[in-house]
Every structure is written in structure tokens, then in C-alpha cells.
Image: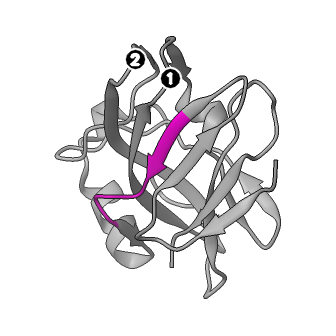
Amino acid sequence: MDVVTLGPDETLTVQNPQVNAQVSVDGGVIRGSRADTIVAESDAESNLFSSEPVHGYEYLMVHIRIKNTDDYSLAVSPYFDLPVYVSGVSYNEENLELEGYPVLEPTTLLSNEEIHGWMVYMVPVGGESAELAYEPLLPDEPLGFIRLS
């Protein structure tokens, strides 16, 4: 299967023997100082660690929708399935709860069910384009990318 890179308003449709799903970024992308402020203003008790980004990094918030288009159930593990790539480097989700931004939770979707929610990543500061990858545990490689800017 050819791995495609789509624009931010496009839906990634995956159809192969292991996965039949649609992935989209439908609720927006927030990056930089606005995302940093949202994280900093969140309830400190809901986050286990410091909410300040590491020096040279900033937060990237992405609202993601996943729909199971298969006749069988689909396990969704956002931390593992949906990394963000910046300059070829993979970044996994930060474990943050943000007030007013429901998190995309791990689940199992039945046929034609969908789920949506926010994921927060810490990425390098700068103008580098970020890409959301969909790489479910099987086959454990990116099946496609969506540009986030």
C-alpha cells in the first residue's frame, strides 16, 4: 500500500486486510503560545507532571476523529496509533487532561462507530510543518499522514 500525505481538511481513508478506518482532523489545530496558555490554565490537579513545555518545545493540540468502516471491531489506542511527525521525528501524545478539551480515549469501535477528541503533543518550536500519522499496532507502520499546517 502506498502511504499518502493529505491536507489538513482531507480525510485519510485506510482500507487493507488489517484496518478499515477513516481518520480526520475536524476540530482544529492549536499550536504555540495559544496551546501553551490552554495547558497552563488547565487544572493543575488533573495533570501529574509540570505543564510547562521543555525549553525549545511548544504544545500542539489536535482534534481528531476516527471512524471504523469495517464489519469488525477496531481497537483505537491513540497514544500508539496517532503520533505526530516533525522533521521526520515521531512525537507521542502527552498525558494531559485539559478542561474544555475532551481527550481522545482508548476504545474499541464497533462497525461504523466513531470517536473524536483532543490529543496534545510537545513538539519543537518553529515553523516546521507537523504531520499526524495513523499507524495502528498492526501493521505497525504509518498508513498515511495528515498535514497539520
Residue contact between numbered discs 1 and 2, judged by CB atoms under 8 Å: yes
**x%, y% of residue 61?**
42, 59
Check disc 2 and report the residue beneath it: 111
Write the residue at 48% across / 46% down.
Answer: 23
Earlier in the chain: of badge 1 and badge 2, it is 1
Residue 119 part of the magenta segment: no
Q: In which quadrant of the rendered view does residue 97 lie?
A: top left
Q: Tell me, what colour scheme is on the image?
A: one colour
Label ID, residue 84: none
Which amino acid does the dot numbered 1 rest on? Asp
Instruction: Give the class, few, some or many, for how many residues have Cα within 10 Å of label 1's Cα (few <14, many ≥20).
Output: many
Which amino acid does the dot numbered 2 rest on? Ser
Check disc 1 and report the residue beneath it: 70
Instruction: Give the class, few, some or many, for how many residues have Cα within 10 Å of label 2's Cα (few <14, many ≥20).
Output: some
Question: In the image shown, does 70 or 55 lie closer to the viewer?
Answer: 70
- Tell me if I can see residue 5 in this picture: yes
Q: In the figure, is residue 73 to the left or right of 34?
A: right
Question: How many angstroms separate mark 1 from mark 2 (CA)?
Answer: 6 Å
- Tell me if I can see residue 124 in this picture: no
